[in-house]
Image: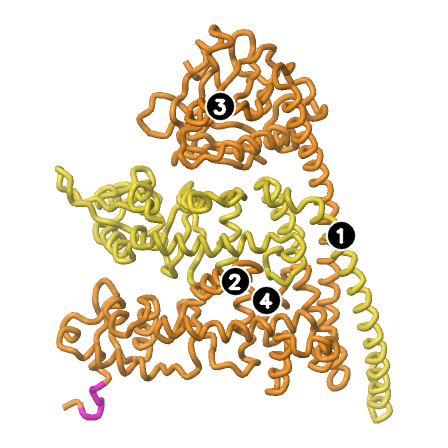
Chain colours: A orange, B yellow
């Protein structure tokens, strides 16, 4: 039975594998066969299970095979990477291999009895047949090597094989026979990758300590600025304000999460920009005055990052005109995020960048604005957009004969108004909160005209 | 400085304030210089790191995940802005912002089917299918990070846990406790019946039907009346796997 040879893989009730601490998935392939290689050792191969067409999950600790259908008789198994003795690099390509499903071959250490064991004295050749249509065998092989070399299971907190902390590959490599030159080169490549991963973690730690220092320095500065702005007024504030803006840029560069950066850009760049300033900034953006950039930044009393923020604000205000029109006057912020970034292609903006840019519009003389509904949904609309006009149209819709009887739903309103259903729903809810509409249906999504509004309390009879 | 009563006291207080202010200016200037220096040191350290390990971050989901964890522990957000050093030097911003766009697309495309609630696992699977030609692997951890950034845009993007599963919500509908309990119940077979809800959760008939109907209205549930026993089943695409068989070829 498979259970004797290969360790079982534990699954959650929803069929996902239970991962060990520190274990992270790296690759997922469907329709994979896990088979022993017949040619070499028929005896061992006989007791090794033939697992057909399953889901293969590579993690940084193990190779997991799960049956793809619930009715399969096979049970989920896991091969610890610690028990992998050797992985074959891509073998020769031939006419035969071109039309067959790609195969990955490796050896697994076993005890003389055939149980998979990282310290086992024998090994069994195993083959993965990748039948899935969308598999890239080279990419998977690369990740397999990486995970195997990475030896993440030896890290503290990882479920482990033996306490051996010898260098990568020591003692587990079976003697190599065959295309030795290519093999060796490939192994050397992965060996250097592994060393660099160890380096990488060390460097990462060092970097993070520095980042931590920055965070603590920022906190000290923040407290100082806070106390400073409480005691002083007037001229001294300009000094403080100057360093406050620089502080903001500083925080943004390092990516420090602080209440200061979460405040609106309105607080960041505190003054309303004059018409003149906006023109100057646009010229800078178009690189007309680029040789005066430093002087202008000083003159405008903004920072380099501040300037970039204004560029984005202006660019965005121009960009949204067409999408707003196409959407019928109002568009979801998240839709703009997608449309804008897709148009950009590279150097995409983050969701935070987008939000800050829209908030910055308050300081710029642009015809668009950000609006937040009670539900939390945020939209961009033209400043000239009139809610009253929309309400008038809703009212006429709601007074139609069928609407009087069965009310108006968000999708009805959407079709009539020519806007997205989500937007229509927001308008209906707002109209309801203004008392114009009533929502008495049991399922809560049909709106009726509020006739009670028409009743004058002083004229009831 | 102790405040003394009288004009003399006022003058002294003013003088003291002036002195403090002057000192404050100098101190502010000094600290700004210090900040600039620290920033420049940090930047070069990050540059070095990027030069050596930019590829590791891109190619290795495990390393990437570790990187993010450490950033979070330290209190920095490498994905906050594309103007930050992290995005500029490490270049991971684009990866996550683009992932965000793709996630929104997929959620939108599957909304007619699952009402705006999709299984994280399925989302990742659809993402990988869509990104077949891309060189970078996408892990569930990556999806979660991209989604956490999307939250700030206010359209209700959020990850909620129901039982052992994680569901990604892309509409601002609130799920109350009753809804959550039904979803948890539905995970086992992908559907529930009114009786089952009443029995397993010990609810009244009215409560069960109310909750199920509102889930129906939100588009999160689908009705199945085609069984011989005549009992109506409420299917939940977001926790069952039926959605993987229906309509996803079109994505």
Q: In the displayed structure, does residue B121 sit left or right of residue A344?
A: left
SS of the residue under disc 3: loop
Q: Which residue is mark 4?
A: A262
Identify which residue is drawn at 44% across, 53% down: B103
The range drawn in magenta is: A454-459
Q: CA distance from mark 1 to mark 2?
A: 30 Å
Question: Given the image, what chain letter belongs to the residue carrying mark 1?
Answer: B
Which secondary structure type mostly characterizes the magenta part of the structure? helix
Asked whether B217 or A461 is in front, the reply is B217
Q: CA distance from mark 2 to mark 4?
A: 25 Å
Q: Which residue is mark 1?
A: B45
Mark in the foreground, 4 or 3: 3
Query: Is B46 above or below relative to B33?
Result: above
Mark in the foreground, 3 or 1: 3
Residue at mark 1 shares a chain with residue at mark 2: no
SS of the residue under disc 2: helix
Mark in the foreground, 2 or 4: 2
Q: Which residue is mark 2?
A: A344
The spot of residue B177 in percent (x, y) is 36, 53
SS of the residue under disc 1: helix
Question: Given the image, what chain letter belongs to the residue carrying mark 4?
Answer: A
Asked whether A234 or A60 is in front, the reply is A60
Residue at mark 4 shares a chain with residue at mark 3: yes
């Amino acid at each position: 039975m498979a259970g004797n040879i290969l360790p079982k893989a534990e699954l959650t009730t929803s069929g996902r594998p239970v991962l060990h601490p520190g274990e992270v998935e790296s690759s997922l392939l469907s329709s994979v066969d896990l088979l022993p290689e017949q040619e070499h050792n028929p005896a061992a191969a006989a007791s090794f299970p033939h697992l057909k067409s399953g889901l293969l999950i590579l993690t940084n600790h193990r190779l997991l095979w799960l049956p793809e259908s619930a009715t399969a008789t096979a049970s989920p198994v896991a091969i610890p990477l610690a028990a992998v003795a050797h992985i074959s690099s891509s073998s020769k390509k031939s006419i035969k291999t071109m039309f067959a499903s790609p195969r990955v071959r490796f050896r697994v250490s076993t005890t003389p009895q055939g149980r998979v064991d990282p310290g086992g004295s024998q090994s069994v050749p195993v083959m993965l047949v990748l039948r899935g249509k969308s598999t890239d065998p080279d990419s998977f092989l690369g990740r397999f090597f990486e995970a195997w070399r990475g030896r993440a299971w030896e890290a503290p907190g990882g479920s482990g094989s033996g306490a051996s902390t010898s260098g990568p590959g020591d003692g587990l490599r079976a003697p190599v026979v065959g295309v030795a030159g290519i093999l060796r080169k490939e192994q050397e490549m992965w060996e250097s990758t592994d060393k660099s991963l160890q380096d990488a973690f060390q460097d990462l730690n060092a970097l993070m300590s520095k980042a931590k220092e920055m965070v603590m320095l920022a906190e000290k500065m923040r407290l100082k600025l806070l106390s400073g702005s409480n005691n002083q007024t007037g001229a001294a504030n300009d000094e403080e304000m100057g360093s406050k803006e620089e502080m903001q840029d500083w925080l943004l560069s390092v990516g420090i999460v602080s209440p200061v950066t979460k405040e609106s850009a309105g607080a960041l760049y505190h003054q309303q920009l004059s018409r003149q300033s906006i023109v100057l900034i646009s010229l800078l953006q178009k690189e007309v005055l680029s040789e005066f950039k430093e002087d202008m930044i000083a003159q405008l009393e903004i920072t380099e990052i501040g300037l970039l923020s204004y560029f984005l604000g202006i660019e965005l205000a121009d960009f949204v005109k067409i999408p707003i029109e196409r959407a019928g006057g109002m568009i979801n912020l998240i839709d703009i995020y997608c449309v804008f970034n897709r148009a950009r292609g590279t150097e995409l903006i983050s969701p935070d960048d987008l939000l800050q840019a829209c908030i910055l519009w308050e300081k710029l003389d642009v015809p668009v604005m950000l609006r937040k509904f009670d539900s939390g949904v945020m939209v961009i609309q033209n400043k000239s957009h009139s809610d009253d006009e929309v309400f008038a149209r809703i009212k006429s819709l709601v007074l139609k004969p069928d609407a009087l009887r069965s009310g108006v739903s968000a999708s009805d309103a959407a079709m009539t108004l020519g806007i997205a259903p989500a937007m229509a729903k927001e308008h209906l809810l707002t109209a309801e909160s203004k008392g114009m509409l009533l929502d008495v249906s049991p399922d809560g999504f049909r709106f009726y005209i509020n006739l009670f509004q028409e009743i004058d309390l002083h004229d009831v009879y | 400085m102790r405040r003394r009563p009288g004009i003399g006291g006022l003058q002294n207080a003013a003088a003291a304030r002036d002195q403090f202010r002057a000192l404050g200016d100098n101190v502010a200037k000094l600290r700004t210089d210090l900040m600039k220096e620290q920033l420049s040191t940090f930047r070069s350290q990050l540059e070095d790191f990027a030069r050596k390990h930019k590829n590791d971050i891109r190619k290795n989901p495990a390393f990437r995940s570790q990187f993010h964890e450490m950033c979070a522990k330290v209190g920095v957000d490498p994905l906050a802005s594309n103007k930050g050093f992290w995005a500029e030097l490490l270049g991971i911003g684009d990866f996550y912002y683009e992932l965000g766009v793709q996630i929104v697309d997929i959620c939108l495309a599957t909304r007619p089917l699952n009402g705006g609630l999709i299984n994280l696992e399925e989302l990742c699977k659809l993402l990988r299918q869509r990104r077949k030609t891309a060189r970078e692997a996408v892990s569930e951890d990556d999806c979660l990070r991209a989604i956490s950034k999307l939250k700030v845009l206010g359209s209700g993007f959020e990850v909620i846990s129901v039982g052992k599963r994680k569901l990604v919500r892309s509409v601002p509908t609130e799920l109350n406790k009753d809804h959550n309990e039904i979803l948890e119940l539905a995970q086992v077979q992908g559907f529930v019946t009114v009786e089952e809800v009443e029995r397993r959760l010990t609810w009244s008939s009215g409560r069960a039907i109310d909750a199920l109907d509102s889930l129906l209205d939100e588009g999160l549930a689908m009705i199945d009346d085609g069984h011989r026993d005549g009992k109506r089943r409420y299917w939940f695409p977001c926790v069952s796997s039926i959605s993987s068989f229906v309509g996803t070829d079109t994505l």
